Amino acid sequence: MTEYKLRTRNVRKTYGSVVALKAASIEMQEGEFLTLLGPSGSGKTTLLMAIAGLNNPDSGDIWIDGKLANFLPPFKRDLGMVFQNYALFPHMNIFDNIAFPLRMRKMPMALIRKEVARVLEIVELDHVAKRFPRELSGGQQQRIALARCFVYKPSIILMDEPLGALDKKLRESLQREIKQLHENLGITVLYVTHDQEEAMVMSDRICVMNDGSIDQIGTPNELYFQPSTMFSADFLGESNLFDAQVLEVGKDSVLMRGPAGMNVLGELKESVKIGEQVKFMIRPETVDTDNDVTRDNAVEGILKEVIVFGQITKYFIELSDGTEMVSTQLTSRSSSTIEIGQRIILNWAKTSTVILTSDAGS
Amino acid sequence: MSSKSEQLPSVTYTPIVRPRNWSRFLSISPAILFLGFFFIYPVVLLLGLSFVDSSGTLTLEHYTRLYEKAVYVKVLLITLKIAGWTTIFSILAGYPIAYLLSTVKSSTRNSLVIWVLMPFWTSFLVRTFAWIVLLGRHGALNELLLALGIVDAPVRLIFNFTGVMIGMVHALMPLCVLTMMSVMENIDRNLVSAASTLGARGGQAFWRIYFPLSAPGVAAGGMLVFITSLGFFITPALLGGARDTMIVQVIIFQIHEVLNWGFAGAIAMLLLASVLVIFFFYDQLLGLSTLSGESTHEHKKGVIGRIGRWLGGGVINILSYLCEQGGILIDKLTPLRTDRKRRQGSRTTLWITAMTVIAFLCIPALFVIPVSFTEDGFLGWPPVGFSLQWYEQVLNSPAWAAAASRSFVVAISSALLGMSIGVPAAFFLARRQFFGKAALFAFLVSPIIMPNIIIAVALFYLYAKLGLVGTNMGLILGHTILAIPYVVITVMAILKNYDHRLDQAAWTLGANKWQTLTRITLPLLSAGLIAAFMFAFVISFDELTIALFVTGGEVTTLPKQMWDDALMRVSPALAAVATLLLAFMSCIIFSTEYVRRRGLRK
Ligand SMILES: Nc1ncnc2c1ncn2[C@@H]1O[C@H](COP(=O)(O)OP(=O)(O)OP(=O)(O)O)[C@@H](O)[C@H]1O
Ligand SMILES: [Mg+2]
């Protein structure tokens, strides 16, 4: 068995009658960037707190560096945590804030000065050392929170929506900074965000959480193109989701009867049986509107609406039974030549049809 | 009410006032005029008396006498010593409770706070007598100690410094707890969590992070206790020995026995001067704004501020170091098990400590109730048999009935008057930005800072000229002075959390200023306003100092009647009155709490 840097098994946490976390199991390799993604209240912070040792889980196990750490006090875990609201100490100036973990580690003063100066340089805020947290902007405070965490070189860093309160521009530049620090220092990062784009950009793997339990873990690509549950499919990106009945299970494909009587071909998935009711999903960007009837799947509909979102254009097509399907394409000059009300044959490859087995949540 | 006269444009985003239009100050002027005439003016008059002799010529004779007679300086020093120790004990015993209260669930907190506030609702005269009976030579505590064999002979717990401390700490600790709690509640708990992930042990995180952040609350609570204790006279008179005389007792003696107003004024001046010096140091160290429970992390630049910070930092380093070493030692003695929950030893200790202190706060109230049903003729422990005779005696006595009804009338009137003056002032202060705002706030709350005895004596002097001594009106006006600061502080606190955009929304929807005020603002604030009213009511209902001076003959309030009664004879009738009062106050507090919760649900 490979040794994981961080591992949890069936961690459960309740607050009175509220089950905040049901049975969370994750494994992280050294140097990995894993993101917890999920709606508000899905238990992301609770899991992070359990790993940091800030709440005692009701049951389940936590290993850090292969050692059992269920009730190891936080200050012995060699991990760093960046809190949702920064948690900078308001009564200490920036220097003292960043020096705090070093002082706790009994580092000599000369070295502390050097180290603090070094991380302040990394976050490009060397001029604020004498200021107090409230005298910094939100983005600056955020960077100080990161600096305070990086300065003592913990081998694992937990970040709870670190960029939540920032505007888009600052957010993107900090995303790059965090990613760079992660790569340069080889730290294991467990990251929490609401923002799926952020999760996609930054993570090696994403862990989708829903209602206190883990829905699916996978690379951004897997999650996006091969979601295994309704929830993940719906939560990440946009999707065309339909009910269908399995007609045939072939050698390498599955044939289903979808809405408007269309026959849909999808890639083989072992678990499906003939006659079973399933759902399938097609990402709008994999659906073409070029009337190519020779593809694996083709269905006719009427164009209802075209919306140009800058670089991309969305086409809303109504099938014969009134079901709506969306296709997303790069905006081009020809986009505007298609007229509303026109008949269109939508088509897509069978690899783009993702069959979802009904999950417990739905 | 007030805002009707204000002429804001219908949609404002920055309500900044240009003080050109004087009608805008209409809402604050009643408060200024009232306090100016009934508070500042008489106090200045009284203090002015200290500079003239009996024939009316300017002199410093009172001050030279003050200086020559070592006894007055000595009394001042004793007063400062008693106040200082009261403050220290109140903080030491109150901090664990405040810490516990600010870290438990809000439902637990609400029920615990009621017990912490117990001393507030037990009339202070009665609790003083309760202490006499409990701590006396043959009192309940000594009996217990003897029975347990802890001591061989009765311990002297009363009529000395110990007695004064017990009485005063008991009376003032709730104030300290509430003030510290209001600061602690606003400390972000993630900060301590953050410190522990950064490598701090529990004790280190507490001393380096939590404690410095709670320090403004400790200072403000301590300050309030200190200033209030300077004005105490009943507790030291009844529980202390001859050597525990406080300065207020000397002022009362000068006025009641010697009728030397000028000299009384000089002593009052001495008291006021020491209060001001203390405030100066406090301001240098922490800033006066922390007194309202606001925590500023602004660092004071002055020399005193720097020395204070340096000393504080040193103490915190030492305590933090001790905690760390202790933690390491414990780790060595009991090897760490990561598969088992750690024992929460510190939490248990905290609960035990806090519960012990809460028990101390509740004892006199719990003592009074059984004693009121005694068949015996005197206030003693344990009560004998069961009878309602004392209740009958009190309820059938016209004197008690008259005092009770007067207390009601006075308390309701002064609460109403205090509200109608204080609420507009609070609105004005909370909603406007103008030059001198801090000074105006300080002026409005200054009656809290001024020792009550000075207000009482000054009012007596003024009323004597106006013919208001011994009238209900005089009492109402006097209690209104005390009520205004509390109303202003309470209402400003709720306005701080009130979303001003709701008013703006109402204006854009077509409501005029008056409609907005009556249909939106006041209903939303009703819970807070009721709390402010109750606060004012209770302050007046339990007030003795002013009542002692401005009432006369037949015109007494309940506390005054109890005082007079107690001076004649300490009978269980007092316990009966106290029990009735306790029941009554409980009703008020619970109904306030009920209204508050209903307000929260909305
Ligand atoms: N201290 C607490 N007491 C009671 N319930 C809690 C506590 N902390 C969290 N919860 C509950 O546990 C559940 C999970 O909370 P958690 O904070 O982990 O969610 P989250 O995924 O971090 O949400 P968000 O994205 O909004 O931060 C929620 O239903 C929340 O109400
Ligand atoms: Mg969260």
Image (spheres, grey):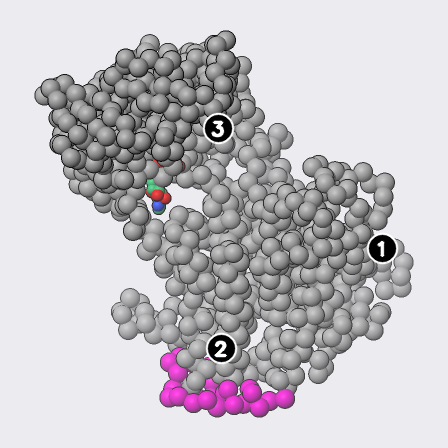
Residue B136 location in percent, x, y?
Answer: 43, 73
Residue marked by disc 2: B579
User: Does B316 sit above or below residue A132?
Assistant: below
Q: Was residue B384 drawn as part of the magenta stretch in this picture?
A: yes
Between A206 and A271, the one nearer to me in the picture: A271
Per the image, label 2 sits on a secondary structure element best described as helix
In the image, A219 versus A49, the foreground residue is A219
- Determine if residue B414 is in view: yes
User: Which quadrant holds the N terminus of chain B?
Assistant: bottom right
* Residue at the spot of label 1: B59
Q: Is residue A230 left or right of residue B295?
A: left
| Chain of the residue under the numbered disc 1 shown in the image | B
Chain letter for mark 2, please: B
- In the image, residue B568 above or below residue B456: below
Tally of marks: 3
Q: Is residue A154 magenta?
A: no
Labels 3 and 2 positioned on one and the same chain: no
Residue B222, horizontal then vertical, whole percent: 54, 49
On the rendered structure, is A228 left or right of B422? left
Amino acid type, callout 1: Thr
* Label 1 CA crowd tier, 10 Å (few <14, some 14–19, many 20+): some
